Image: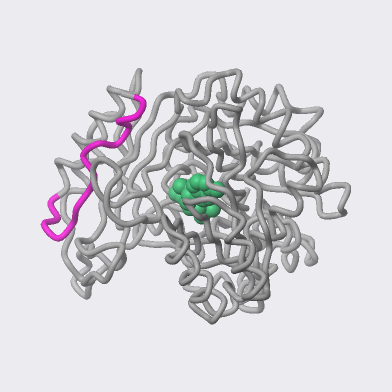
Amino acid sequence: MKILVIGSGGREHALAWKIKQSPLVDEVFCAPGNPGMDEIGPCFDVDPTDLSKMQELVLQIVPDLIVIGPEAPLAAGLSDALRARGFDVFGPSEKAAQLESSKGFSKDMMAKFDVPTAKYGRFTDLTEALDFLETMDAPYVIKADGLAAGKGVVICQTLEEAENEVEAMMTGKFGDASSEIVIEEFMEGEEASIFVLTDGEGALYLPAAQDHKRAYDGDTGPNTGGMGAYAPAPVVTPRIMELVQTLIVEPMLDGMAEEDMPYQGVLYVGIMVTPSGPKVVEFNARFGDPECQVLMAGLPGDIVPALLICATGGLVTAHAQIAEMMGLSDFQPTATVVMATDGYPGSYPKGSIIDGIEQANALEDVTVFQAGTDKDSDGKLIANGGRVLGVTATGEDLKTAVSAAYSGVDQINWPEGFFRKDIGWRAL
Ligand code: AMP
Ligand code: GLY
């Protein structure tokens, strides 16, 4: 089989790496890919949101399966365009991907199907939004409706701050993405992420993962795309997982099918574990990054049958067999430590030289996934983005996995980079 992986982050490197290990797979292609993915298979420099260029590429490769990693091409309708040409695609339709691309849509769906989440209001009118704020208590949670590269949620401690934020968003802070906003109740608790592979009917639950959103140790500093992750996350007990399944995922999947937009691909369920049970913080239409790195490395089996059946249907009948092929019940504890360029998530320089990836990869149980990397004119690996490497390791328990990941980090010689030293602290 030939599989095309779309995207260029650590998430897509991990997907391509895992897919390449499948005995079903002859060749993995990537678009646009990165230097790490280039070692797995040919990379094509095509923008995933350019639907016509992507279709040209796909007609040239003729893959048996296309796996779409990031949200932007999903929201742009790439999966619909490729399916219309007869290709099997892992990734939701543009309509179904609104669970991520419109926070208001997502909240309305949750309300309609009685899925537990924070109380909210949805606004396009500034005066109405400001009036609603007065009916809420601090802290105030304000969200841009559309995609804002992970920056669209602001939590304000005072009413004045909240009013200013609402006004800034509605007058163009994130362009069109924040002309509509959601204001919601603040939820207390511990966060976790649950990833569900689905063909729209059946569902395979991957072990719960936890991300580290803040830039610095002790969960301090600005929010980032994620500075590390681990799985399984013990905060999601079997009881919580059961509640997520029956109160959140099953009603959402049934509801989306009823609304004529069945959800296929991976559903990312961000939850808050509150004293009154799990509540949805957000849905995303894709794997989390770095969570995907942890999940791909920790699964001992073959991911390809699962990806394929989500794209083509039939998961309900084949569920037990697919779960066994993935090795779902033998998932190994795994941790990823993200190495980022100094300055991230603010501005940072590009072009610093990174050494030691081979040495890190040579360690038992360690794999380095690449994200914002490039090659310079001498073929040396250089940093070309904020989050640059995901040093990932498995272990017999989480503690061993975390310590192996840090042994990997020790092998990397990159003075311009930084990383958090406390990945997994909540579980350890
Ligand atoms: P999101 O992009 O929706 O994941 O929001 C970013 C982060 O904001 C989440 O990971 C939470 O830490 C926080 N957050 C979002 N909504 C809420 C809420 N209603 N209550 C508390 N924290 C929230
Ligand atoms: N790590 C969080 C995300 O990918 O959205």
Q: Quadrant of the C terminus?
A: top left
- Quarter-wise, where is residue 77 in the image? bottom right
- Quarter-wise, where is residue 234 in the image? top left
Q: Which residues are magenta?
A: 413-427
Residue at horizontal 66%, vertical 78%? Answer: 52
Q: Position of residue 391 (x, y in %)?
A: 29, 43
Instruction: Check if residue 68 falls in the magenta segment.
Output: no
- Position of 61 with respect to 399 (left or right) is right
| Prevalent SS, magenta region | loop
**In front of the other: 250 or 320:** 250
- Position of 196 with respect to 407 (left or right) is right
Residue at horizontal 25%, vertical 40%? Answer: 218
Residue at horizontal 60%, vertical 32%? Answer: 278
Residue at horizontal 61%, vertical 18%? Answer: 239
Kindly tell me whether residue 288 is visible in this rendering: no
Instruction: Check if residue 425 falls in the magenta segment.
Output: yes
**In front of the other: 103 or 78:** 103
Q: Position of residue 358 (x, y in %)?
A: 22, 46
Q: Position of residue 74 (x, y in %)?
A: 64, 63
